[in-house]
Amino acid sequence: MKKIELVPIESMSVDFQSYGVCVSVDNRQPDYDSPEFKFWNKLGIIESQNKCSICMVESYPQKQSLSTVFECHTRTGETLIPVENDVLLVLGLSKNSQHNEMDYDSVKAFLVRKGTAVILNPGTWHYAPIAQHEVVHTFVVFDHATPDSDVIKIDSQDAGVGWEIAN
């Protein structure tokens, strides 16, 4: 199997825009500011026709971070919010508008900082957040029916390729 090394890119970078939206309070004034707290409204909008579900992924550091399994949601986006530590996401774009094939040339690794969120576009190939050094909890928010009715999975080993995070 061919292993392609990926150097992580900040999710706040312009490179992320094809895959989704990075949500942060950086470079934005709060909508409400008081001595007790600050409040930022509408940092990101989650599109959904149905009720949303709040889920949790618990990721464990691995000696080797080889990514070969990916999933895609063709009709729904997915929001990921790392809680206590940063995570890495290995993402790919779809080859076509049906989102049934991943464009292997588009695969990149993104560093998502704790305290930020990313909203993945429908059709963005991904898998679980990758913990780097410690266990990480990541909130996942999406349409409650997504896991049951809007998931396509692939294993890139079938095509003889995988992606590894550079040290």
Image (cartoon, grey):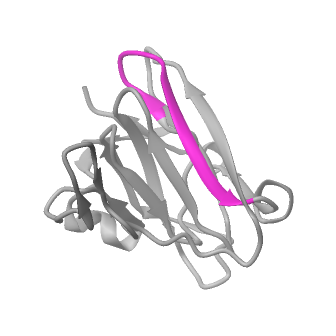
Q: Nearer the viewer, residue 91 or 148?
A: 148
Question: For this view, does 156 lie left or right of residue 84?
Answer: right
Q: Is residue 35 above or below residue 76?
A: above
Question: For this view, does 50 lie left or right of residue 154?
Answer: right
Q: Position of residue 158 (x, y in %)?
A: 67, 48
Q: Position of residue 128 (x, y in %)?
A: 57, 40
Quarter of the image where the C terminus is located: top left
For the point 86% across and 57% down, the residue is: 148
Question: For this view, does 23 lie left or right of residue 152?
Answer: left
Tell me if residue 159 can be seen. no
Q: Position of residue 119 (x, y in %)?
A: 47, 62
Q: Position of residue 163 (x, y in %)?
A: 43, 41
Q: Nearer the viewer, residue 99 or 25?
A: 25
Q: Main secondary structure of the magenta part?
A: strand
Question: For this view, does 99 lie left or right of residue 31?
Answer: right
Q: Specify the segment rendered in magenta.
A: 130-143
The reply to whether the magenta stretch includes residue 132 is: yes
In this view, the residue farthest toward the left is: 27
